[in-house]
Image (cartoon, rainbow, N blue to C red):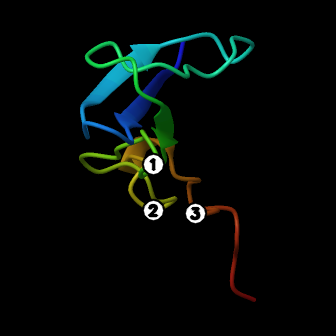
Amino acid sequence: MPTYSYACTACSHAFDAVQSIHDDALTDCPECTGAVRKQFGSVGVTFKGSGFYRTDSRSESKKPAKSATSSKS
């Protein structure tokens, strides 16, 4: 289930909530019961390491072999 970030408009309390995408958005701050707004941030996917490019994801053994059947006339 996704994690959503919220911030209170009254007391500025920030918190995260794990909710289903089908659940309604939260409306009350757990600290002061004021109104909260959903915060939008960066995408939650982080790519680390190599292997994300076509040339990086193939090892030498998996590359197609050069044809040895070509002959010169």
Left or right of 35? Residue 20 is right
Which residue has dot 1 on it? 58
**Mark 2: few, some, or many residues within 10 Å (few <14, many ≥20)?**
few
Which residue has dot 2 on it? 55
Q: Position of residue 23 (x, y in %)?
A: 69, 11
What distance separates the C-alpha of mark 3 from that of mark 2? 17 Å
Tag 1: residue type? Answer: Arg
Q: Earlier in the sequence, mark 3 or mark 1?
A: 1
Res. 56 image quadrant? bottom left
Look at the picture and state if 53 lies above or below 23.
below
Which residue has dot 3 on it? 66
Q: Position of residue 67 (x, y in %)?
A: 64, 62
Along the viewing direction, whichever of 42 and 53 lies nearer the viewer: 42
Foreground mark, 3 or 2, reads: 2
Q: Earlier in the sequence, mark 3 or mark 2?
A: 2
Tag 2: residue type? Answer: Thr
Q: Position of residue 59 (x, y in %)?
A: 38, 46
Tag 1 and tag 2, C-beta contact below 8 Å: yes
Considering the image in quadrants, where does the C terminus appear? Answer: bottom right
Tag 1 secondary structure? loop
Left or right of 59? Residue 65 is right
Number of residue marks: 3
